[in-house]
Amino acid sequence: MRSRDFLTLEETSRGELREVLDLARDVAAGRLSSPLAGKTVCLAFFETSTRTAVSFELAARRSGADVISLSEKGSAIAKGESLVDTVVTLDSLGADALVIRHPAAGAAKLAARHTRAAVVNAGDGCGQHPTQALLDLYALSEAFGGFDELAGRRVAIAGDVLRSRVARSVIPALRTAGMEVALVAPRTLLPMEAGVWDLPVLPSVDAALEWGSEVLYMLRLQNERMTGGSPRVPSVAEYAAYYGVARRHLRRGVWVMHPGPVNRGVEISGDVVLDGASLIPNQVAAGIAVRSAVLALATGVAQQVAA
Amino acid sequence: MKEHDGQSSELVIRHAHVLDPSTGLDAVKDVRISSGRISEFGDDLRGTRELDADGLHLFPGFVDVHAHWRTPGREDEETIESGSAAAAAGGFTGVVMMPNTDPVVDKPIVVSGLMRRIEQESRVRAYVSAALHVGLKGERLTEMQLLKEAGALCVSDDGLGTQSAGVLRNAMLYAHTAGLPVLLHCEDHTLATGVVHDGVAAALAGIPGSPASAEDAATATALVLATETGAKTHITHVSTALSAALVRFFEGRADVTADTTPHHLTLTDDLISTLDGAYRVNPPLRPEYDRDGVTEALRDGVLDFVATDHAPHASEEKELPLEEAAPGFLGHETAFAALHAQLVLKGKLSLTRLIEAMSFAPGRWVGEGGSLAVGSPADLVLADLSERWTVGRETLSSRSWNSPYLGQNLTGRVVGTIVGREIVHDLVKVSR
């Protein structure tokens, strides 16, 4: 079985999304035993990450893979080795899958040109973060009672769309799943040509609920967007008032999501993060099964196991 | 305040020459005002209270989108009470207060405090411009959405230009999101290093000049950014022919309006030869070439309206050598008379266009006022176009007297101003 890259979800079909989610459900149910036995998974993180790195590592180990973990600290990466050289080295060592996190968009695509291993993009710059969007779809499918139940429902993505790789994966993934997507952000946090997505831009979380949003997908507002030479938003108070979710927004049938880590009191008020309406713990939990499924599909073992 | 219409009565103004560019009315008519609104025009209207305005003109109330009422912080120079009295005396029924006060109007609580004080003290309709950046410093954005909720009409760092184009662009994007127009004082401080226009008069007088490019370069930047960001943008106190031409070029390409001031339309930089601090203003008085260019642009509608930049200063800040004096002129009380005398009577501007540029056009920008259409609030001005009067300290209602027209004879005078139900200025005994 040929290896398969997971670089972006922009061109991913509904069938392919369903395939990942179905396989992830099998993983979660324990129907696959050590699918990655004998495979080598390399984690190359050129940017600090805790939750994504841990999630991928657990997913790979529980699937029986050998795991090599390179991080920004204490490795060739820390010594300034270039992306391409690191990738070539790992390829030579016989890696079956490369999981790459990098601060620049396009890094995963570049890596894929220099290795026979399957490349899984674990987040590149403001580009793509496909496994995040897949685990979001998984958590949403569970919440609404199945992948097919997502079609026609409305979701609002709120916050720093301009600098969000999560948004660039989540937008196509949710739309492919049949959901109607709206953005909630000031113009300072949107691309100049945000119209390219052909999505409504709503002025506040309140407006998103009026619009009929059943899911409030909150993006992280990086601290440097509020400080520095020319901040993109005036204050936490104003940001939270218009683009944050608070207890008053919670109601039956509305779910709150966040890719983490959360800025409590900024995009989500502290008393909402762990409320029953929050899918945030479900998103994290879905990560392991979804990433196991992705690695299984990437390395080409999935069909054999399932067969 | 005197109410002109009690419960039982209304006011009929008879025989006034009504000129209302918003409706095209230009004829001697009687007008009935009831419940603070224009209710009827006719040829022989009678009422329980009548004012014979034979020989007077009746215009829509003027609207001034640029004024400094120095409150809070410098109430020795102007208060909401005195500023609004000056406005009423000049025929202004609506005024926008600039935010460069102490404290700066950069927090919602300051806006709501001002709104309450306006409600209590202002004789005319007054609107609050909040700051574009905290402390007018061109760094942190103000909480524009919360400022708007508190009642702000627009945002501006007036008095200062934003020095970084990147910072300005970001602020314009955010203002666009907040739904607030941005009012821009265009000045590049790296160019504006002098105190007067860098022209012949400055050279002869030995006073450091600021080149016209200080305004023109900043205006060009602002217009480009307005085009790109889509922000509703107003360029205030355009004073050069080139800046006016730039505005003309961007017409239809951006959501831009612009104004110029009575002093840039009527005075020139030859006044620098007096070496008198009274004539320091920012942007500075320009040569005739610029004055004529700006006048032509106002006539053509490229510059949408007149705004006074009413800027009271205490005498100790003005009775100084030019280089040490504070920049700024009083504006409300002399605007109509100066423009009527210097432009209309000299054939440079039609009376209709002048009235449009003082009432309808700025009223549209503010969102109310500037029209005598039936049903509109009865915000109106009675003027005697033939009255000759001398601007003197004793004629001014402002707490300050830094008018560049002090001692000048002007022809044409506002003799009565009504805002809704209230007579706010009354030289003709409307309230008799």
Image (tube, coloured by chain):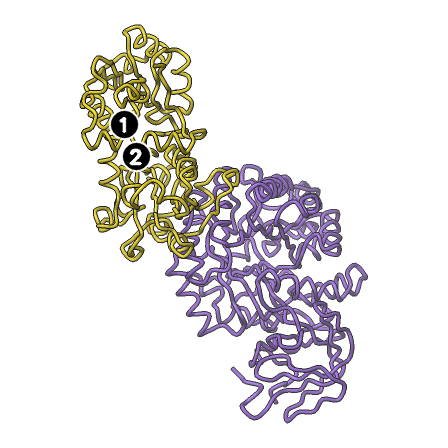
Chain colours: A yellow, B purple
Q: Are marks 2 and 1 in contact (CB under 8 Å)?
A: yes
Q: Is residue B110 left or right of residue A270?
A: right
Instruction: Please name the amino acid that badge 2 sits on.
Output: Leu
Q: Secondary structure at mark 1?
A: helix
Q: Secondary structure at mark 2?
A: helix
Figure quadrant of residue A70: top left
Q: Is residue B323 above or below residue B114?
A: above
Instruction: Check disc 1 and report the residue beneath it.
Output: A291
Q: Position of residue B408 (x, y in %)?
A: 69, 65
Q: Residues within 10 Å of mark 1 (few under 14, many from 20)?
A: many
Q: Earlier in the sequence, mark 2 or mark 1?
A: 2
Instruction: Please name the amino acid that badge 1 sits on.
Output: Arg
Q: Is residue B202 left or right of residue A84?
A: right
Q: Position of residue B133 (x, y in %)?
A: 44, 48
Chain containing the residue with disc 1:
A
What's the mark number on residue A135? 2
Determine the residue positioned at 39% across, 33% down: A169
Along the line of sight, the residue nearer the viewer: B425 or A227 = A227
Residue B38 shows in this picture: yes
Q: Is residue B146 above or below residue A293?
A: below
Along the line of sight, the residue nearer the viewer: B427 or B183 = B183
2 and 1 marks on the same chain? yes
